[in-house]
Image: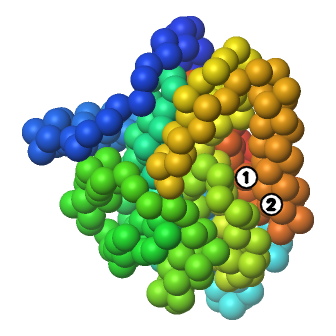
Amino acid sequence: MRALLSRLRRRRPAAPAPERRGPITPPELMRRVRRIEIHTKRLVDRGVAGDYHSVFRGRGMEYSEVRPYQPGDDVRDIDWNVTARMGVPFVKQYVEERDLTVFLAIDVSGSLAFGSRGVLKRELAAEVAALLAFAALANQDRVGAALFSDRIELFLRPARRRNQVLRLVREILGRPARGGTELEATLRAALANLRQRSVLFVISDFLAPLPEGALKLAAARHDLVVVEIVDPRDLALPVTGPVALADAESGELLVAGGRHLARAHFERERARRQALADLTRKLDVDHLELRTDRPYLPALVSFFAARRRRYAR
């Protein structure tokens, strides 16, 4: 894993690229899905599955068998009945009872069709979702998903099926990018259909009003991880101008430019992102930032490591 991260850090950032428009042809879509499958499964095989397993645990531990006591074993694990019969101490062994469900709630609204650095936000969302899903399957966990914009676009019930992951990636990439974002209502609708406690990833750029009520509900019922997809142009407008801008969700056009407008936009976006960070801290849930202008794997590995340290305390 360290060698893989070293190679990623040596890569130069991708050159700026224009937003891609128009529908994806079926052959191109299948090529993209296949590329993501190969790439993410390779990462799973190289260690991501082990990192995932160590930080997302099942519902508890179940008794397996006994073995002779060894120095350093916890005395609380001694099986006193077997010890009395055998005349020497034996300790209980346990195995993890995973029975774990991973659920991915993914924003597919119009704003996710944007990307200024060679990869669209929805392409990044698709690849990260695939990586998490394949890591879950490698650990025999169930995977479900909901795609949402201003409505629930697709709901996949949790299952242990590779084809379901491939369908999820295909739907994220191939579904026409349109519509606004209604995070509050759509997240609540998805949660209403998710009855078992799960590891819940909410993947979005969170440009819409913050769904504070839905996130509070999710944090109370599930192991919530907020994954924020960020593109540099979300945060900073060009200082020079005038520049024609189009709202990715409403289609509204705006001619903008100048230092004053750029500064006002930056301050507004900084406040929005700070509000999300403050809320996740208040709810005591994980907040992972992934950017279109940087490799996502180092951020994901750092997230796993931080979570492992936190739960080891």
User: 46 and 103: which one is in front?
Assistant: 103
Residue 218 appears in the picture as rendered: yes
Residue 177, given in percent of the width and then of the height, sits at 37, 52
How would you rate the neighbour count of disc 2 (Cα within 10 Å): few for under 14, some for 14-19, many for 20 or more?
many
Give the answer, above or below, for where 156 lies relative to 181.
below
Vertical position of residue 60 compared to residue 205: above or below:
below
Q: Which mark is residue 287?
A: 1
Which of the 4 image quarters holds residue 20? top left
Tag 2: amino acid: Thr
Of residue 151 and residue 27, the one placed in the foreground of this image is 151
Residue at the image position 73 percent from the left and 56 percent from the top? 286
Proximity of marks 1 and 2: CB atoms separated by less than 8 Å: yes
Q: How many numbered marks, from 0 up?
A: 2
Mark 1, secondary structure of its residue: strand
22 left or right of 76?
left
Observer-nearest of 174 and 99: 174
Quadrant of res 34: top left
Question: Measured from the top left, where is residue 143 in percent x and y?
Answer: 40, 67
Query: Which residue corresponds to the image point at 26% horizontal and 50% vertical from the top-left?
Result: 174
The residue that label 2 is drawn on is: 280
Q: Could you tell me the amino acid type at mark 1?
A: His
Is residue 65 at least partly visible in the picture?
no
* Image side of residue 199 versus residue 156, left or right: right
How far is disc 1 from disc 2 in space, using C-alphas? 6 Å
Disc 2 element: helix
Q: Quadrant of the C terminus?
A: bottom right
Whether residue 4 sits left or right of residue 24 in the image: it is: right
Nearest the eye: 267 or 192: 267
